[in-house]
Amino acid sequence: MKNEWPLWEIFIRGQHGMSHRHVGSLHAPDAEMAIKNARDVYTRRNEGVSIWVVEANHIAASSPSDKGPLYEPSESKVYRHPTFFDIPEEVGAM
Amino acid sequence: MYAQMIKSEATQDDPEKLAAFQARIDAGEKIEPKDWMPEGYRKTLIRQIGQHAHSEIVGQLPEGNWITRAPTLERKAILLAKVQDEAGHGLYLYCAAETLGVSRDEITEMLLDGRMKYSSIFNYPTLNWADIGAVGWLVDGAAIMNQVPLQRTSFGPYSRAMIRICKEESFHQRQGYDAIRKMAEGTPEQKKMAQDALNRLWYPSLMMFGPSDKDSVHSAQSMAWKIKMNTNDELRQKFVDQTVPQAEYLGLTIPDPDLKWNEERGHYDYTDPDWSEFFEVIKGNGPCNVDRLAARNKAWDDGAWVRDGLLAHAKKKAARQHAAE
Ligand SMILES: [Fe+2]
Ligand SMILES: [Fe+2]
């Protein structure tokens, strides 16, 4: 609309040394205000120790129709998982 | 509920696509914003999520009314935190609605000019401190009844918003019950106030679940799409069954002389609210409809210079930075 604040996607790092995780979005005039608003909207109960904000229109995303070409190739490569290989018990943990 | 009487939009999409879409929902898959979806699904959800969001925002008014007059500093801090949560709930839900292609300003303006509704419950006044306890206990209690199953709704952003909201709602109901319990266990005068609050808010709380199933014509499509998880009467019954023992513990009487345990059904029998009152409130003729909309319009108009000013400042700063690079 005429004068709407841009949309920001909000990423928060939880307490436990995890990656930042997408938690939602909000409107703000600039990055500084987006961080302040994210503090109020998404961390009212100690949910985070760090906040990233990214303007939503800067995010490029894969499209649902690419699902096949993107992810099917990995389905046939079962040897990428450790359970593919039988290791004799005598060898011990591996 | 917070979304009452949501009419399912008719859909005129390719039958093959519709069948594939329904199969995804039946398999328990989540629908995400960029996925194909029927136009009716999109429109119904915008209306439902929007109405839910508006309810969270307008719902701040009856409680905000008592922040400055809370009986102790602790109650004041608790109520402030509760009302702040409701603002957050509104924001989570507006963002979920926006992923369906409606802008924040558009959806706000539809509330402000009356094209979109909010829950009928917020058109009732909070006359005294006992009402604040009763609102947390009954109104948030009723909201939880419907929000818990909605965590499993088919639309991903709506489901995620519900999960966040449900994490916070239990605090809301418990602080309300704690506040009204203090009064029910207080002086005879305080107990009378608690009873009076229950008397006034009981039927409006039952109305939150929407009309009786026999008059609720739009449920089937929404239930198939998993954007409505239970019928109105199912949830209302659940609410009554849960609330009666809570009132008994307080020594308060539910204002329904015909309320009694039905051994055979395993549920309480209860009296339906006066549906003509409900429809009047929905039409705009409740005790506070005019005040509520006026307050929201005033906040929007008075805030215009802040929104415009901050945006102008951000643009100027960005331009200056651009020039310096
Ligand atoms: Fe809420
Ligand atoms: Fe709440």
Image (spheres, rainbow, N blue to C red):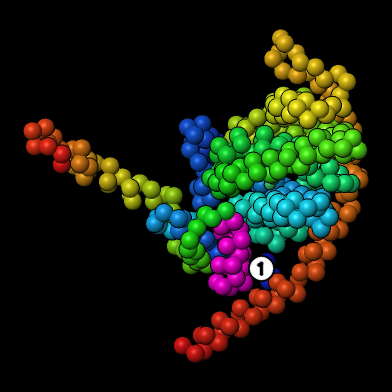
Report if residue A86 is visible in the image: yes
Depth check: give the residue in front, A10 or B263: B263
Q: Which residue lies furthest to the front in this view?
A: B187
- Graded by Cα atoms within 10 Å as few (under 14), some (14 to 19) or many (20 or more), the crowding at tag 1 reads some
Name the quadrant containing residue B235.
top right
Depth check: give the residue in front, A51 or B131: B131
Quadrant placement of the N terminus of chain B: top right
Going by the numbered disc 1, the residue's amino acid type is Glu
Which residue does the image show at 56% across and 57% down from the upper left? A43
Depth check: give the residue in front, B214 or B181: B181
Residue B31 lies, in percent from the top left, at 52, 43
Q: Is mark 1 on a helix, strand or loop?
A: loop
* A30 inside magenta stretch: yes
* Magenta span: A24-44
* B233 inside magenta stretch: no
**CB at mark 1 closer than 8 A to ligand 1?**
no
Residue A88 lies, in percent from the top left, at 9, 33
Instruction: State left or right for residue A42 relative to residue A89.
Output: right
Instruction: State left or right for residue A18 relative to residue B10.
Output: left
Which residue does the image show at 80% across and 67% down from the upper left? B301
Q: Residue furthest top?
A: B264
Name the quadrant containing residue A33.
bottom right
In the rendered image, which residue does mark 1 sit on?
A: A4
The chain carrying label 1 is A
* Residue B151 versus residue A47 in the image, above or below: above
Which residue does the image show at 89% across and 46% down from the upper left? B127
Residue B284 lies, in percent from the top left, at 88, 46
Which residue does the image show at 75% across and 19% down from the upper left? B268
Residue B98 lies, in percent from the top left, at 62, 55
